[in-house]
Amino acid sequence: MIGSPILATWFPEAASTHAAGVDGPFYWIYIAAVLALFLFAGLGGIFLWIFRRQDRNQLGAVTGPLNPVFLGLWVLGALGLAVFAFVAGFPGFIDKTVAPQGSYGIEVTARQWGWDFTYPNGHVADTLHVAKGFPVRLTLNTEDVEQGLSIPAMRVNQAIVPGLQSEAWFEATTPGSFELRGSIFSGDGFTDMNSALVVHEPADFTAWLASVSDIFQGRTYEEVGEILYSRLGCKACHTTTGHKLVGPTFLDMYGFEFDTVEGNKITVDDAYVRESILTPNVSVIAGYQPVMTPFAGLVTDQEIEAITAWLKTLSSKGGVEAGAEAGAEESPEAENTESGDAAGQEEN
């Protein structure tokens, strides 16, 4: 019955171990409900026919107390249906609630109107990738309003409440690409909260994770810097449009001179960018508070270089753009030129 083509079309493709604990109870409860409907509707029709008024002068009999036998059967039948539904669904509910020990953990961040999936090695993607045959534990948070994560093929549907960390897990059984979407209305852009779950064979998943974990692979320093601007949360305090937020705008910052709250003047160069990332509250631009989180130990020297290269593209005094592919070595001529420029600045 459960595997029949007609009933199978009621659910998306079953691609996780949760399917048996969700689909089976649904069909059995549905069948029980249909049988109950036919029973009560059939008895109602029979009683209407038997006890119908056949003569205008016919009067209904005076009713007495309810028959305790029929009343007991009615109560026991309803109670039995409820117990059956509970027993059928409870094992699947428990299975979906508790993730197996050693599950592969992925952090999920929902926001209007998209998703971030953060892997144990720090890689962040907007598409969820997992390995077939391995349990995956999702730790879910929302940055704004209440959200919901739905992966129909995995039989996952989890509400995400602001300020409350939620969890869900599944084990994919079929490789392929499956729908992932928001399941709770969260505003006018709700329909844009669509992504995908990609299930790989274990070896392919390992290869994919290794290929995407290097943010510099196939990208220029400027492109990496723009990605880090979002990934590190810089956009929450610094705009690229000239508008001021908690911190100064990044537009026309590099190469310009600013006053500091300490009464000094600084020029935003490579050294200042590095200092502002690692120890940001040592020298603060006037008009702002020393509230930035230090990133010492959280970003690499190469990532700082990428951020600096990207900042140059936002400034009219940014100088010659880096433009080189990430990981490419500088030529000896470039190194000599930079050394000569530095020496000239010291002489001046």
Image: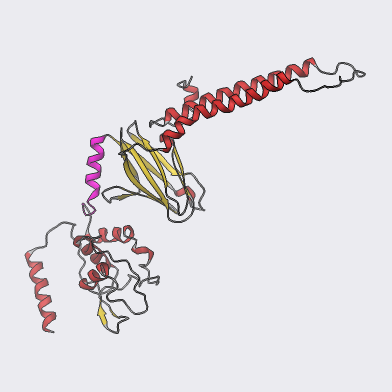
Q: Nearer the viewer, residue 247 or 315?
A: 247
Task: Give the main secondary structure of the magenta stretch.
Answer: helix
Which residue range is magenta in the image?
A: 202-217
* Residue 64 image position (x, y, % from top left): 82, 22
Residue 108 appears left or right of 223:
right
Q: The C terminus appears in which quarter of the rendering? A: bottom left
Q: Nearer the viewer, residue 224 or 294?
A: 294
Give the residue drawn at x 44%, y 48%.
193
* Residue 181 image position (x, y, % from top left): 44, 43
* Residue 97 image position (x, y, % from top left): 43, 38
Q: Against 118, is 268 above or below?
A: below
* Residue 138 image position (x, y, % from top left): 37, 44
Tell me which corner region of the image, top left, top right, bottom left or bottom right, holds residue 310: bottom left
**Residue 107 visible in rendering:** yes
Tell me which corner region of the image, top left, top right, bottom left or bottom right, holds residue 296: bottom left
**Residue 40 visible in rendering:** no
Q: Against 19, is 216 above or below?
A: below
11 within the magenta span: no
Give the residue drawn at x 45%, y 30%.
91
Figure label count: 0
